[in-house]
Image (spheres, helix red, strand yellow):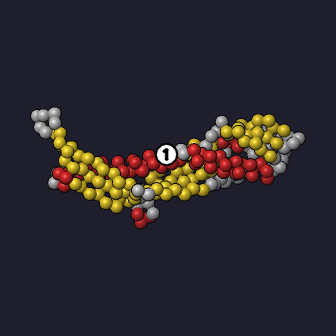
Amino acid sequence: MFVAFTFGAAGTWAVHHDFSEEPPSGPPLIAFDKMGHLVSVKLNYSNVIEFIQPRRVSIPATPLNLSAGGTTVLLVAKGDCTVASDLTRAQYRDVKHSEHTVTLLLPVPAPLQARVNHDGRAKGGSYFYAVTEHGLQTILPGLQQSTTAMNGALQRAQNEIEQACKQPSMIAMAKENAEAVLGGMLQAIGWKAQFIWK
């Protein structure tokens, strides 16, 4: 089984300034709390998942059920997730206008969106490489069995993507990238920032 991840950083906003206004409580030009989420890491996911859905058959008039084989699915899974900081909760602390320094309190980055790409093979998305029935399942009717197996494989892929975005290394990278983006914006207007994650 092979798992591959790639990641990147992004952050783009338009910032406006009205020179007729008095300086706000934080550095001028920037009101982070009105910017929504800052996506600082995007992780691309790919994996080959083998999922086995067993099937059991009940024996009439008894509490017994017997193994009837099952269905094995091979899913080439692809997807992505993003890690973001919710800037609506950002707060300024220790603002020193004379020195142009500020402390910015930010919420710890968290997964914003995690998804399996269902676009299909032709569009670079996930696809089922094989669906194989074994044991008595090969002679038993049951389209639902294959559907259940496919759904199980897709759910496993979804769980893997969500867990990958929660890794401490991803959160640490999201913090680093967010500080680079926000610090650069503040530096561009002559302010130096210290960041505290809460």
- Residue shown at the point (11%, 34%) measured from the top left: 61
- Residue shown at the point (40%, 61%) measured from the top left: 120
Rendering quarter of residue 168: top right
Residue 21 seen anywhere in this rendered image of the structure: no
Residue 107 seen anywhere in this rendered image of the structure: yes
Q: In which quadrant is the C terminus drawn?
A: top right
Count of marks overlaid on the render: 1
Rendering quarter of residue 103: top right
For label 1, the residue is 163
135 lies left or right of 50:
left
Rendering quarter of residue 76: bottom left
- Residue shown at the point (23%, 46%) measured from the top left: 55
The residue lying toward the viewer, choosing from 102 and 6, is: 6
Helix, strand or loop status at disc 1: helix
The location of residue 101, given as percent across then percent down, is 82, 42
The residue lying toward the viewer, choosing from 165 and 114, is: 165
The location of residue 81, given as percent across then percent down, is 52, 51
25 lies left or right of 62:
right
35 lies left or right of 81:
right
- For badge 1, the amino acid type reads Gln
Query: Is residue 141 placed above or below 87 in the rendered structure?
Result: below
